[in-house]
Amino acid sequence: MKNYCTLLLFLGISNLMLSQIKKDSIDARKVPSVQLKDINGKTHNTASLGFTGPVVISFWATWCAPCKKELMAIHDVYETWQEETGVTVVAVSIDDEKTKRDVITYANGKAWDYLVLLDPNSDFKRNMGVNNVPHTFLLDKEGNIVYTHNNYVPGDEEKLFEEIKKLSNK
Amino acid sequence: MYLEMKKNYSKKLKSYPINRKPFWAILFLCFTSFPFLGQGNFTGNIESTFQYLNSDSVINAVQPASKGLMNSFMNVFYTNKGFKAGMRMESYLPRIQGYPNRFDGTGLGMRYVGYGNDFVEVTLGNCYEQFGSGLALRFYEDRALGYDNTLDGLRIVIKPRKGVQFKAVYGSQRLTFVSGSVVRGQGLVRGLDGEVHLNECFYKLNEFPLDITLGGSFVSKYQADDDDQLILPENVGLYGGRMKLQYKNVRLEGEYVQKEQDPSLDNGMIFNYGHAAVVNFGYSKKGIGFSFSAKSVDNMSFRSDRNKDLQDVFINYLPSLNKTHTYNLVATLYPYATQPLGEVAYQADFLYTFKKGSSLGGKYGTTLGLNASTTHRPIANGSNFNPLDSTGVTYVCKPFDKSDSLYWRDINVNVTKRVNKKLLLIFSYFNININNDVAKVSNDAIGIISSHIGVVEGSYKINAKHNIRAEFQGMFVRKVNGQINDKGNWATLLLEYTISPSYFISFINQYNYGNPDPLKKVHYPNITCGYIHESTRIMLSYGRQRAGLFCVGGVCRFVPANNGLSVSFTQSF
């Protein structure tokens, strides 16, 4: 029985690996559909956010210092980015009920122009395979994930902008 | 015939623990074959942490028998049109230091299948869910903390029309993970929740300036009466309502829930009703944010097993009303978590950004943050009750009726100032008071631990990719009757050098220079470096780690002091 199970598991794992090869060559990864509310109470479907240009999804939390630094760094250059590439930044807060009320205070207090979504029970975080924040995803016009980065250090926003420009030049 | 088959099947299930069942291997095989069947979408992640620990008599760190410790998990989620499925493998070989002590082995920790469209969404198997603000029900996981109270059963969401949503859940909760398989709690949990966003629901209200959302929850748990002395309620209900109003920049929201008689280990087997209430008022517009919150809790520990404690099988969530801090000394020495037996808490939060070009704003804008929170014991009036009478009711407690007994107070100020394109400075001050007799954070402290903490952080951008950052932190603990309280004063230095986008190295030293015991005036140096490539992250750290409380959100776990190497690997896909 044990050997039989091991064989099945082995087949399963090889299936996963093969599917990975297939995925890379044919279809790119899409954003799963989760219903989230923004800080104004409006509901959004993450699979169809309805933006025309490239979209940056940045997972953050009010208790995460590098996350806030990343969004502040982008905030400083956001206008230029938008003019040049038509990009939209969606800041997904994973703050749970303890700190959720601080999200709107913080986002508005910092004068952010992003779409700020609330993911208090980590449903979207889980479905996007996010281990820890900050974690940033770049989506092309068709909603395919073309670039991800799981960290923030000063200068990372430049690399992100290069990737966005690659998309808008296409 | 059918019945016979069913019998055999259930017998088979019983005879094999979850991780050895060929059934699961087949499921796994089917599951991994999906991409060959159609154009599905796979997402997931893996995280693995390995520790090699040394003995260190100075900080009382003991080397575990196996020397090495490892935690790993991997999630795989699949969606294809309306269909969805997911699973998580977990592995504790053995569990890392400070992780809850009932995790061991390798096996399946979560699995579900489901289907959804615009009208209905059904999940069978494990699910995570939250009703309203979580006071009534929250199934949540935090793998870093080892917290997971997922429901195993059925979850249905129905959206009959725009702006209206009903949810129902039915099942039992995850309790522990032993020998590679999940052990569920004894009790059964049933929940119903409805929410209406009036402005979306009614066409006429679409443009109405006042935005209104109403909701209500009902949760019931069942557990057989296992007590031979008392007649315990086997079914316990909890119900409540909530409301959210928003008018332009002003918002007001609140929730109130009541719990029926629920004698438990937590409340000392009393038959009182319990309540929890949260009110939150906020005003914010671009450049300014303000919020004020109030909370009242009495006898609200609600678990699907009345005999459990710590973080086991909680059905509801009672968030503490204070800011989650990030600086090392502030966050991990004296954190506060809600006292489910009762508390009255208030918090105010203010954030203002001085405009660019103004005298205080400078060229790049300056941000000022103020935050204050207090928590007190509620007044529980027991004068008219005989604790030994047959009702089991021992006191009366009115919502928001607070006493002078302080549990927690935190006043903090934060200024963020960008001096020029290269230099960013952040100044913070915290005054924290925590009642160690109630919210226990240390074995060495008496009464209220009062501390002042100052932090200066500077970040300097050397060029487009290279950056250096430093933090200087000092904690000053107030003496009690001339005696040093708890472990006395601390100082922390952190230096970090980063090369975007792939490398970082940081050094941290925490020094307990104020410890009353000269042998315990110890340095805790630690060096960490990491490599990041897109969504892959590899991190190595070596050094001493002091004992402390590791918290995420409102949930904390105690991590003992250790000394050694730690390697972690994370990957998303």
Image (spheres, coloured by chain):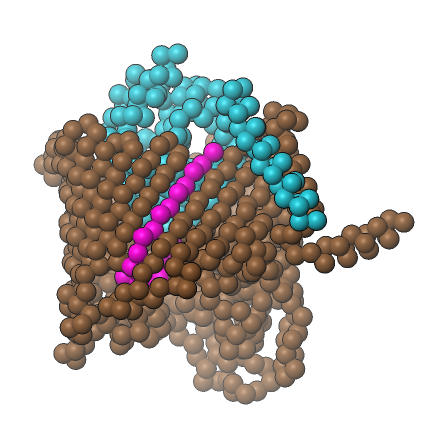
- Above or below, B414 relative to B424: below
Q: Is residue A20 left or right of residue B546?
A: right
Q: Nearer the viewer, residue B277 or A99?
A: A99
View extreme (right): residue = B1
The picture's colour for chain B is brown
Residue at screen point 45% across, 85% down = B383
- Asked if the magenta segment contains residue A89, the reply would be no
Magenta-highlighted residues: B546-573
Residue at screen point 58% across, 41% down = B86
Q: Nearer the viewer, residue B236 or B196?
A: B236
- Above or below, B48 relative to B278: above
Q: What main secondary structure does the magenta stretch of the protein show?
A: strand
View extreme (left): residue = B359
- Asked if the magenta segment contains residue B552, the reply would be yes
The picture's colour for chain A is cyan
Question: In this rendering, does residue B321 appear at all?
Answer: no
- Above or below, A37 relative to B178: above
Residue at screen point 21% across, 73% down = B485
View extreme (top): residue = A170
Residue at screen point 26% across, 58% down = B544
How far across and how far down the image is residue B538, in percent?
A: 35, 40
Q: How many marks?
A: 0
Question: In this rendering, does residue B308 appear at all?
Answer: yes
How far across and how far down the image is residue A111, in percent?
A: 27, 35
Q: Which quarter of the picture shows residue B436?
A: bottom left
How far across and how far down the image is residue A65, in percent?
A: 28, 44
Q: Nearer the viewer, residue B514 or B248?
A: B514
How far across and how far down the image is residue A86, in percent?
A: 35, 18
Q: Which quarter of the picture shows residue B558?
A: bottom left
- Above or below, A78 relative to A154: above
Picture quarter with the C terminus of chain A: top left
